[in-house]
Image (spheres, helix red, strand yellow):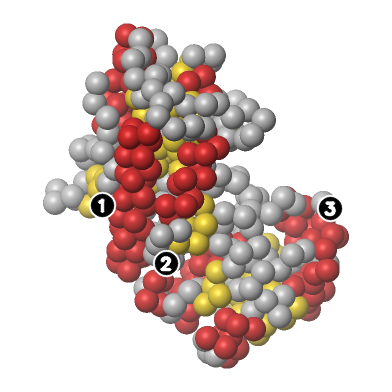
Amino acid sequence: MNTDSVLKENELNFAEIFDYPVEYTGESRESKLNRIREKMAEKSADYLILTKLDDIAWTTNLRGRDVPETPVFFSYMIIGMDQAYLFVNKEAITHAIADAPEIESIYDIRDYDCFFEDLKDIAEGNVWIDEKNKGEPLREDEDAIYEKVIETLKSHNLCQEMNPVTHMKTIKNATEIEGMKKAHEMESITLQKLFDWIFENVGKIPMTEVGISEKLEELRREWPTYIEPSFTTIVGYKDHGAIIHYRPAKETDYEVKPEGMMVIDAGGQYMEGTTDMTRTLILGEISDEMKLHYRAVREAQNVLKDITFDITTTGKELDDMVREPIKAIGLDYAHGTGHGVGHLLHVHEDPVRINQGRQTENGIKENTYTFEPGVIVSNEPGIYIEGSHGIRIEDLMLCVEREDGRLGFEMLTKVPYQDI
């Protein structure tokens, strides 16, 4: 898909946009705009351009179904000091306006495919645009859109750095935190039901990776506020568990038996929030090597449970600490230890990361991200032995301030672990 194609409404599928009420968000649209404009004033920016879909959804207290597994909607936004312009499919936003009529007074709502033409006429003076997306884009041609914004505004005085919304949305307020806790209660109950079903029936009834994934979705549907998965469920039995991003499919589906181990990595989008958790189930006899690996992952995952750390501690430093028990047995894992999680948004929310970092121009990996209270991040070390087995254990954690002013984590996931 090229840049021009995404600018034409008839080539995109627009689902209904819905109001996400303040009872869930904890902050009004007007308050968010005021805070954004305060940050703009600090940068002497006359206009802020938003193109990342999760940033726009958070800013507007709106959600949609245009991107699978992430409740956002195709849109652009231009925020000035006196007016905010929202570019969407006008038919898609009709129901949201009916539920929240103030939307029309807060935003100048314009057609999605008019964005670049109107951008030339609206944006003046000092313009703040986001840096190029370093995370996981929600639309496949996000880089091309970014380049087109740069080209459109090349005669302006541009500030190209992370926009203020990207940071604001990572700091969850009290209402969002309570919602995330509720979402994790529901998801934890659901996963425990699934695990109980597996242990009670494995070896007694036909059971496959795909069937387990379908059973999980069936159980989730019992919750009235459940919307959809936050990513495609991973069910990796035996050597499939060693494939970090394995997705169960009919072509590769394994029958699950009362032996060996199985990785289940799953997350849901609920009106209350977004979840993500992993457990490795021990279904029967396992080797001494597997036991050693499982215990090492448990030990690594426990590192962050009771830790306290200084506010200057970086994501890389935390990542180093978690890897120590696994490196002690001569192994490591080829992914980060943790990623940020949005509130009914992207399950991989930038810029929050516990990892070794992205490679810089000098060839060194670097992650200088430091934590703040209110950030939600995953904790998911693992061991993967190709052709044999995989182990990953994951919880979501809330960053909190301890009594001594240091930081720590509070667990959100409630599903117990297996002991061996």
> Residue at the spot x=29%, y=43% of the render?
415
Per the image, the residue denoted by label 3 is 2
- Number of marks in the rendered image: 3
Q: Which mark is residue 224?
A: 2
- The vertical placement of 387 against 200, above or below, is above
Residue 361 at least partly seen: yes
Q: Which amino acid does label 2 sit on?
A: Pro
Q: What residue type is labelled 1?
A: Val
Indicate whether 314 appears above or below 288. below
Pick the front one: 83 or 343? 343
Q: Is residue 303 left or right of residue 24?
A: left
Q: Position of residue 14 (x, y in %)?
A: 71, 68
Q: How crowded is mark 3: few (under 14 residues within 10 Å), some or many (20 or more)?
A: few
Closer to us: mark 2 or mark 3?
2
Task: Give how far across and how far down residue 125 sits, in percent.
Answer: 69, 74
x 33%, y 35%: residue: 200
Judged left or right of residue 417, residue 190 is: right
Q: Where does residue 8 sit, x and y in percent of width and height?
A: 83, 67
Asked if marks 1 and 3 touch (Cβ < 8 Å), the reply is no
Residue wearing tag 1: 400
Instruction: Give the amino acid at mark 3.
Output: Asn
Marks 1 and 3, how far apart in space?
A: 43 Å
N-terminal label among 2 and 3 = 3
Mark 3, secondary structure of its residue? loop
- Asked if marks 2 and 3 touch (Cβ < 8 Å), the reply is no
